[in-house]
Image (spheres, coloured by chain):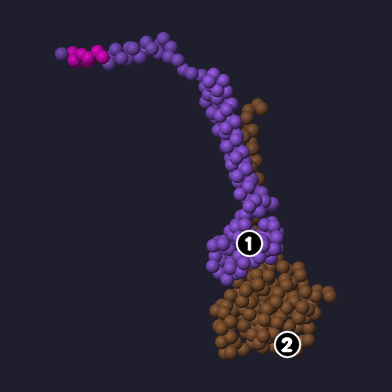
Amino acid sequence: MNVVARHRRTLTWVALLALVAGVLVYVAASGGSDTPATRARDLSAELRCPDCESLSVLDSHTQSARAIRADILRRVEAGESDEEVRQFYVDTYGESILLSPEGGGLGVLVWGVPVIAVLLGGAGLVLALRRWQRQPRLHASGEDEALVERALADRATPEEPDGE
Amino acid sequence: MKHPARWITIAVAVVVAVIGIVLATQVGTDPTADTRSSPLLGKAAPQFSVRTLDGARVTNTTLAGKAVIVNFWNTWCTPCREEHDALSIFYARHANEPDFAMVGIVRDDTARAVGSYQKRTPDPWAIALDPSSAASLAFGTRGQPETYAISPDGLVAGAQIGPATVESLDRMLDAARRIPQ
């Protein structure tokens, strides 16, 4: 029992790490077993319907969207990678066919700025917390205590009537 | 690190300045600009195969060696009707040129609607159906009307998103003919 108590913190960390590793392995494994239909569906959700305003190919019912869904499935079943399918549509329609910005060019800014903002915010928070911890604790001095006692005594003594 | 708060403030200022510069340089640029042009310009025309109303097959191969105007349209599209006169005038001017061809590909419409429309107002150029939208998809069309010019050696030489005029059609045909074979 003593050993368990002594290593409780280590065991907690090991259990947490095992849990995180398990989740990662599960996610990786489930990602690898995507069926062509699932992959085609995911890719359809990434592309903007070309003749709608802001709907994905997956959500749109236009003839173009239906044709693109069928084309994506055909490409996936023919062995094209997700990147190859995306690239075909960018080559045919331009970058605006992608609902999410790409990782290059201005896209770096779109993805990078929130990360930098979170890091800077976190750093600022840590700094502020440290500063607050460093603040000296205040103790009442004898003078302060005497002042409070006098104030309490004054309140306890009833007021004398004015000159009568 | 001495004065960490100062460094964080400087970092925030730098990030804000970078965002400001990027936004300033982007003012006036339209993120949807590529929807008004075609990324296919200058590239090999996409492979397509469509069947005309009288049953003939039209493909890249059957059109090879000609300057081709491909017009995507349909019967319910008002801008398509508005550009129809321009297409008729343009076609009449060039119909007898042996190196010229024009095909109207129906986008997002039914064979029945197109059939009755063509009975009422028949077009002298080839009208083809695209029931699986394969040709519309290959050209990256976003709507109709859209018009493309293909050079005799199969390059996309011009693209018009929206209604074409006689002048814009002439320009596209010239561009298609200017590409050396």
- Residue mark closest to the camera, 1 vs 2: 1
Q: Residue at x 60, y 57 (%)?
A: A38
Residue B139 occupies quadrant:
bottom right
Q: Residue at x 63, y 61 (%)?
A: A97
Residue identifier under label 1 = A97
- What label does residue B95 carry, if any? 2
The answer to whether any part of residue A158 appears in the image is yes
In the picture, measured across the screen, residue A10 lies left or right of residue A144, that is right
Name the residue type under label 1.
Ile
Q: Chain of mark 2?
A: B
Q: Quadrant of the C terminus of chain A?
A: top left
Tell which chain the image draws in purple.
A
Q: Residue at x 28, y 14 (%)?
A: A154
Nearest the eye: A137 or B27: A137
Residue that extends furthest to the front in the rendered view of this protein = A1
Residue B129, percent across and down? 63, 80
Q: Position of residue A56 (x, y in %)?
A: 57, 61
Write down the region rendered in magenta: A156-163
